[in-house]
Amino acid sequence: MPSFETLALSIEDHVATVRLNRPEKLNAMNAAMWNDIRAAFRYIDETPEIRVAILEGEGKAFTAGIDLQMMMGVGAQVRDECDGRTREKLRRVILDLQDTLTSLERCRKPVLAAVHGACVGGGIDLICCADMRYCSSDAWFSIKEIDIGMVADVGTLQRLPRLIGEGMARELAYTARKFDGAEAREMGFVNRVFESPEALRAGVREIAATIAAKSPLSVRGTKEMITYARDHSVADGLNYVATWNAAMLMSADLQAAMMAGVSKSTPQFKD
């Protein structure tokens, strides 16, 4: 199992827990963390024994968002005597950061975000890429980019309207106001609010364990279908799932699940 500079990774009972691990910096997302996130979810995707992933934060907060020192260093990173090449380099930096967060969507395994404390700026971009979001009652959120004079550019403005509706997404992005776990639940941004960070971790692990007990092939296919349907027409989605099941339906998982139903036993599935 790989080790990371800014993350802690553990695996138990087919569930990987990825913990943002810069608590002294409120898990601010520096350059190393962006690289670690992509590498971690690539590893989760490629490791058969992992069926589900949980994403959480160490310390007082989930994340304070992008590390400001990293942002201040971007100018030197992209500087070129040709202005056009400077702009091209900056565009490539932004595309690379977008790709880092998209690694959660590319990962074939479901990703459950468990948020406590602050989740600000880039943290919103990050959890918008998760399959489901949960939080504790102390959690609060803010799309902060507008307050530092920039447009959020790594996914919030593209994904959040699909999760909570365009009108509410616009309000939150234009104002940068804080919203708490109860409001996040009301608007459908999080699935459930737990009383404490401890209850959050226990509750999300229970949900992850339930998913991990299902057919891994079916779970991976279901994630693929839902993500595809989000970005395509109903007709396209129906056509794709027909093709998928024509290829994947007659699996050992189907046979195991049907036999378990007949014998009233718990099915066992290959990773």
Image (tube, rainbow, N blue to C red):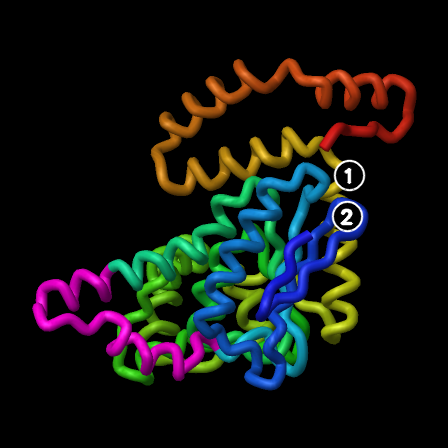
Residue 134 visible, this orientation = no
Please report the residue visible at 42 percent of the width from the left and 29 percent of the height from the top: 237
> Looking at the image, which is closer to me, 39 or 248?
39
Q: Amino acid at mark 2?
A: Ala
- How many residues crowd mark 2 within 10 Å: few (<14), some (14–19), many (20+)? some
Lateral position of residue 237 relative to residue 75, left or right: right
Vertical side of 256 occupied by 192: above or below:
below
Residue position for label 1: 213
Q: Is residue 134 magenta-colored?
A: no
Asked whether the viewer can see residue 50, the reply is yes
Q: Residues within 10 Å of mark 1 (few under 14, many from 20)?
A: some
Report the amino acid beneath label 1.
Ala
Kindly report the distance in space between the C-alpha atoms of the residues bearing marks 1 and 2.
Answer: 6 Å
In the picture of the structure, the residue carrying the numbered disc 2 is 209
- Residue 223 occupies quadrant: top right
Query: Magenta segment, which residues?
Result: 65-91
From the viewer's perspective, is residue 109 above or below residue 218?
Answer: below
